[in-house]
Amino acid sequence: MYSKTFKSNLNESDVIDVDAKSIHLGDFIYLHGRPCQVARIERSSIRDQYSFTGVDLMDRNPYEETSFNTESGQMAHGVVLNTYRVLDLADGYVTCEDEDGHVRKNLVVNGESLWSQLQQGFESTGDSLKVSVFWQYDRGYIVKFDNGGKSDKIKDVYPILYFQDWCTCDRCFSL
C-alpha cells in the first residue's frame, strides 16, 4: 500500500493519520509525500473516498491524492505541527520554547518577508507570539504564527535550521 511506503520515508513523529472527514481547506497534509496546504476537497459518493488537491509548501506545485481506506475509515496523512513560543528575535535568529520548556536556540529564518512578519508580531505581542512549525528530515518550517489570538498563515514557507546545520549548497539554499 502506498501509505506504508510513504511513511517509511519520514520520521514516524512527522506524520499522523487523520480522518479524511476532519480535513478542511487550508489544513496541512502530505500529498504524494510532499507537505501541502489543502486548496480543494472533493468527495466521491460512489467510492466513498475523498480527493485532496493541495499546494506544495516548498515548490508551490499542485498535488492531488485520494484518501486511503483503513479499518477506521477514510484517512489521509496529516502534517504534525509543533507550537513554539518565541522568546527572542535578534540578528536574524529565533529562539523558541516548546510546550515542555525545551528551548531551541539560534534558529535561522530564511527570508526577509518572514523575518519582518515575525518581527512585527513579536514587537506588538512580546513573548506571546507563537509559531507553528512542521519538521521534515530534521529541518523545521514555519507555516503560521499566532500573535495574541490572531492567527496568520504565512504566504511563503521558510525553513528554519539549527545554526550549526546551515547548508549553502544549491539544493538547500534555494529552500
Image: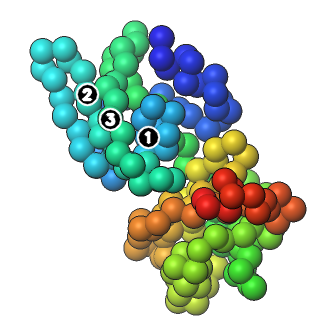
Q: Amino acid at mark 3?
A: Glu
The label on residue 50 is 2
Decide: few, some or many residues near mark 3? Use Cα within 10 Å; few <14, some 14-19, many ≥20.
some
Q: CA separation, marks 1 and 2?
A: 13 Å
Of the residues under marks 3 and 2, which one precedes in the sequence? 2
Of the residues under marks 1 and 2, which one precedes in the sequence? 1
- Give x and y (percent) for residue 46: 12, 15
Location of residue 141 by image quarter: bottom right
The kind of secondary structure element at disc 3 is strand
Of the residues under marks 1 and 3, which one precedes in the sequence? 1
Q: For the point 73% across and 54% down, which residue is it?
A: 100
- In the depicted view, which residue is nearer to us: 154 or 113? 113
Location of residue 152 by image quarter: bottom left
In the picture provided, is 136 more to the left or to the right than 61? Answer: right
Q: CA separation, marks 1 and 3?
A: 11 Å
Location of residue 12 by image quarter: top right
- Give x and y (percent) for residue 44: 16, 23
Decide: few, some or many residues near mark 1? Use Cα within 10 Å; few <14, some 14-19, many ≥20.
many
Position of residue 119 relative to residue 104, above or below, is: below
Q: For the point 46% across and 37% down, which residue is it?
A: 30
The label on residue 29 is 1
Q: Amino acid at mark 1?
A: Ile
The label on residue 64 is 3
The kind of secondary structure element at disc 1 is strand
The kind of secondary structure element at disc 2 is strand
Q: For the point 51% across and 33% down, which residue is it?
A: 33
